Image (spheres, helix red, strand yellow):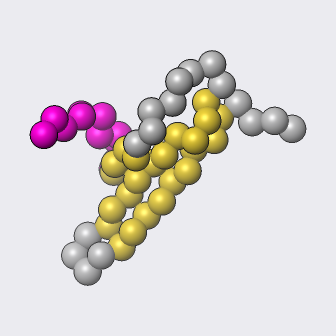
Amino acid sequence: HFAEGVIEFTMMQGTEYITRRMFIKKLRGFVTPIRNFSYTIGKGGIIIETAIRIT
């Protein structure tokens, strides 16, 4: 079977906090951004940080 999308979830545990990241490798019919998205898991579900910082 072929997948319409591939999303990679990673988690890194530090001494004081956990960093969760999501990378969209492929999504049929869409141009996928080449960047990681930070996310948190709370009572309401998964919250994805979509703000782009400009430096």
Which residue appears at 26% of the width and 70% of the height? 17
Residue 37, horizontal then vertical, whole percent: 37, 44
Which residue appears at 86% of the width and 38% of the height? 1
Query: Is any atom of residue 45 visible in this view?
Result: no
Q: Which of 6 and 34 is in front in this view?
A: 34
Residue 12, horizontal then vertical, whole percent: 39, 69
Queried whether the magenta region covers residue 43, the answer comes back as yes
Occupied quadrant, residue 3? top right
Query: Is any atom of residue 3 visible in this view?
Result: yes
Q: Eyeballing the image, is 12 above or below 2?
A: below
Extreme-left residue of the structure: 55
In this image, 20 relative to 24: left or right?
A: left
Q: Eyeballing the image, is 48 above or below 29?
A: below
Give the quarter of the figure containing the C terminus.
Answer: top left
Q: Nearer the viewer, residue 48 or 28?
A: 28
Please provide the residue range marked out in magenta: 42-55
Dominant secondary structure (helix, strand or loop) of the stretch shown in magenta: loop
Queried whether the magenta region covers residue 44, the answer comes back as yes
Extreme-right residue of the structure: 1
Extreme-front residue of the structure: 55
Q: Eyeballing the image, is 47 above or below 15?
A: above
Q: Eyeballing the image, is 27 above or below 38?
A: above
Extreme-bottom residue of the structure: 15
